[in-house]
């Protein structure tokens, strides 16, 4: 009886929450591949290797100061992460753990923000919508690589996490005064937000100013805490703008691009606003999802409007302001030929999504609008939201590429190749290394690769990190062939470039001392195609005698071949050469030859 009641309760629960369950399933389907791929994330992207040795000879804080005073850019907060002693962010274990940390803390920060803004909503409800939002981020974010690439994550994702915590704390402080410790924490968060990236600098500054003027619009005085937060916000912005690295970067890149062009940057920023909105929000999936969310919110109980001084129209304009400012600052500092510098607009994307959700929640509480959509139930809203999110997820190239990397085996093989090559470079005693290009790359992860241009910055950065004189690309062998060769360090390679490999030289006078002398060759060979021209050759001018390896080896690749030396021959040299020869493009890998000996 009890079992029947439990089954009935379970059935009723599933029936009542069917669309919520479907939505959670969709979200888990999106999140899963990005979590699964973390096991194949191998550190070694270009910027990571650069930071692996840059200023490593200095102490931690000396390195940070050197970075700021003479570095490549003014992102001072980035130095706090990239100057970590020991540079453990280049360890394989870190590459697997760090993306999981990012996804988890991003979810936590979004949940914290929703809890601050929607105090009357249940924890389960806020966690539910936080999961939907992080799924949307993973599916639509302009550059998913940043979740796996430490240098990129510290510039784009970590500041997003800090920003959502900062935003949540500021919203909570609207109705209560900030304590001293809360003010210090907010200032610390702004330090890492503003000092991480030019876009985040703009977003952090605008947000801080808005919360400062919020009480003024309510005809109240800003608290001392908000005044201190604004003061430090201005200081941090000035530290970025007037950093020697900022000037250096603009000057250096200005030699190749048309940066610092005010009017061109303003015009292109305005021109590209609608393009970004269309890619992110003005598509059928996002529009349907937003309408479904509006229906759901309209059925929630009336909540305090914590941002009441700012009208809906103002928040709508804020979307355009943030997109415009984000594009402008990148184009002005790096050159307006890169108006859609993808990673540069990631902060804008994160922030605009949050603003849009705030706006939808406010609209959903509008009595006039609520009266027009009352015939849609909350369950209908969840169904509409499910349809919208399904359209978004199904059209996501990020999700598609992640599953391709998993099922094609590209991610697994790329990780194995990256680890093998890095270990080979680290363990090699040679100072000049020529490594074949990795032949497996993924669509989602950054993979280590050998620089093709010996004069490029990545080339010398990689060489310095691994303490080598030169590391560059060699196209004579495929990576698989190279691994087979280096995995058998005592072996001999014969290919179309080397053409032959000498095994043994014999004095003919030593050979003829024996009656009926024989030359015996023992070896083990690999990777010979059926049409191979590889031969075992005996040569002493004018004698040239070749035997096809395919004809003298057994099924296991072993050669134990004896050749009768022609005593009655006349030679123009005193040396008999015994070697392997290959006139075709086939590769012959020969394990240690036990000898070409006289018998």
Image: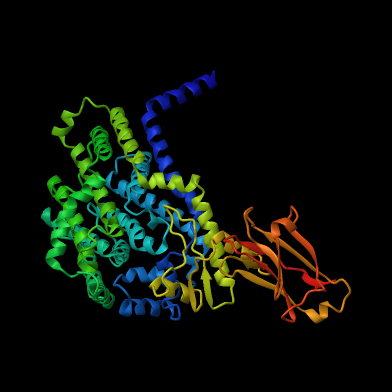
Q: Quadrant of the N terminus?
A: top right
Tell me the residue at 37%/71% (across/down).
79
Q: Is residue 445 above or below residue 194?
A: above
Q: How many marks?
A: 0
167 vs 509, nearest the viewer: 509
**Where does residue 351 sit, x and y in percent of width and height?**
26, 53
Residue 597 seen by the camera: yes
Residue 365 in which image quadrant:
top left
Residue 182 in which image quadrant:
bottom left
538 vs 332, nearest the viewer: 538
Tell me the residue at 37%/33% (across/down).
20
Left or right, 132 with respect to 411, comes to left
241 vs 209, nearest the viewer: 241
**Where does residue 100 sit, x and y in percent of width and height?**
46, 53
Left or right, 586 with respect to 313, comes to right
Q: Is residue 183 above or below residue 129?
A: below
Tell me the residue at 72%/56% (across/down).
551
Seen from this angle, which residue lies furthest right? 515
404 vs 348, nearest the viewer: 404
**Where does residue 151 sit, x and y in percent of width and height?**
39, 64
Q: Quadrant of the C terminus?
A: bottom right
What sort of colour scheme is used for the picture? rainbow
């Amino acid at each position: 009886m009890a079992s029947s009641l439990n089954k009935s309760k379970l059935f009723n629960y599933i029936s009542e929450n069917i669309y919520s369950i479907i939505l959670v399933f969709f979200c888990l389907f999106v999140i899963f591949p990005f979590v699964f791929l973390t096991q194949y994330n191998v550190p070694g992207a270009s910027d990571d290797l650069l930071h692996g040795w840059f200023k490593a000879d200095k102490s931690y804080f000396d390195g940070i100061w050197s970075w700021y005073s003479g570095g490549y850019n003014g992102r001072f907060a980035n130095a706090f992460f990239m100057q970590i002693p020991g540079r453990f962010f280049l360890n394989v274990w870190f590459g697997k753990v760090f993306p999981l940390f990012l996804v988890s803390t991003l979810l936590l920060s979004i949940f914290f923000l929703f809890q601050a803004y929607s105090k009357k909503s249940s924890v389960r409800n806020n966690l539910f919508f936080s999961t939907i939002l992080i799924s949307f981020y993973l599916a639509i974010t302009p550059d998913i690589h940043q979740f796996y690439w430490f240098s990129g994550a510290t510039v784009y994702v970590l500041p997003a996490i800090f920003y959502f915590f900062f935003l949540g704390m500021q919203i909570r402080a609207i109705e209560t005064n900030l304590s001293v410790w809360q003010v210090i924490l907010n200032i610390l968060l702004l330090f890492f937000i503003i000092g991480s990236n030019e876009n985040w600098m703009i977003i952090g500054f605008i947000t801080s100013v808005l919360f400062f003027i919020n009480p003024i619009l309510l005809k109240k005085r800003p608290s001392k805490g908000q005044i201190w937060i604004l003061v430090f916000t201005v200081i941090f912005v000035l530290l970025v703008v007037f950093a020697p690295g900022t000037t250096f970067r603009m000057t250096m890149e200005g030699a190749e691009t048309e940066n610092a062009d005010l009017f061109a940057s303003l015009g292109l920023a305005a021109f590209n606003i609608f393009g970004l909105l269309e890619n992110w929000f003005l598509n059928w999936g996002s529009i349907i999802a937003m309408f479904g969310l509006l229906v759901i919110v309209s059925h929630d109980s009336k909540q305090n409007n914590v941002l009441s001084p700012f009208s809906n129209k103002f928040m709508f304009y804020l979307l355009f302001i943030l997109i415009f400012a984000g594009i402008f600052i990148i184009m002005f500092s790096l050159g307006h030929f890169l108006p859609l510098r993808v990673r540069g607009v990631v902060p804008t994307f994160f922030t605009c999504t949050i603003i849009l959700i705030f706006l939808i929640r406010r609209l959903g509480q509008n009595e006039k609008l609520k009266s027009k959509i009352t015939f849609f139930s909350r369950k209908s809203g969840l169904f509409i939201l499910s349809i919208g999110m399904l359209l978004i997820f199904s059209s996501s190239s990020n999700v598609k590429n992640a599953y391709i990397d998993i099922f094609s085996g590209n991610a697994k093989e790329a990780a194995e190749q990256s680890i093998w090559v890095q270990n080979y470079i680290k363990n090699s005693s040679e100072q000049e290394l020529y490594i074949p290009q990795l032949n497996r790359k993924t669509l989602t992860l950054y993979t280590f690769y050998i620089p093709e241009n010996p004069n490029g910055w990545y080339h010398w950065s990689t060489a310095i990190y691994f303490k080598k004189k030169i590391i560059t690309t060699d196209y004579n062998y495929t990576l698989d062939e190279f691994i087979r060769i280096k995995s058998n360090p005592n072996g001999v390679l014969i290919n179309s470039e080397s053409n032959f490999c000498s095994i043994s030289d014999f004095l003919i006078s030593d050979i003829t001392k024996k009656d009926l002398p024989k030359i015996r060759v023992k070896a083990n060979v690999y990777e010979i195609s059926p049409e191979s021209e590889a031969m075992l050759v005996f040569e002493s001018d004018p004698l040239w005698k070749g035997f096809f390896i395919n004809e003298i080896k057994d099924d296991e690749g072993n050669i134990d071949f004896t050749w009768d030396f022609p005593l009655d021959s006349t030679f123009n040299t005193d040396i008999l050469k015994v070697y392997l020869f290959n006139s075709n493009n086939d590769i012959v890998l020969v394990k240690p030859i036990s000898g070409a000996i006289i018998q």
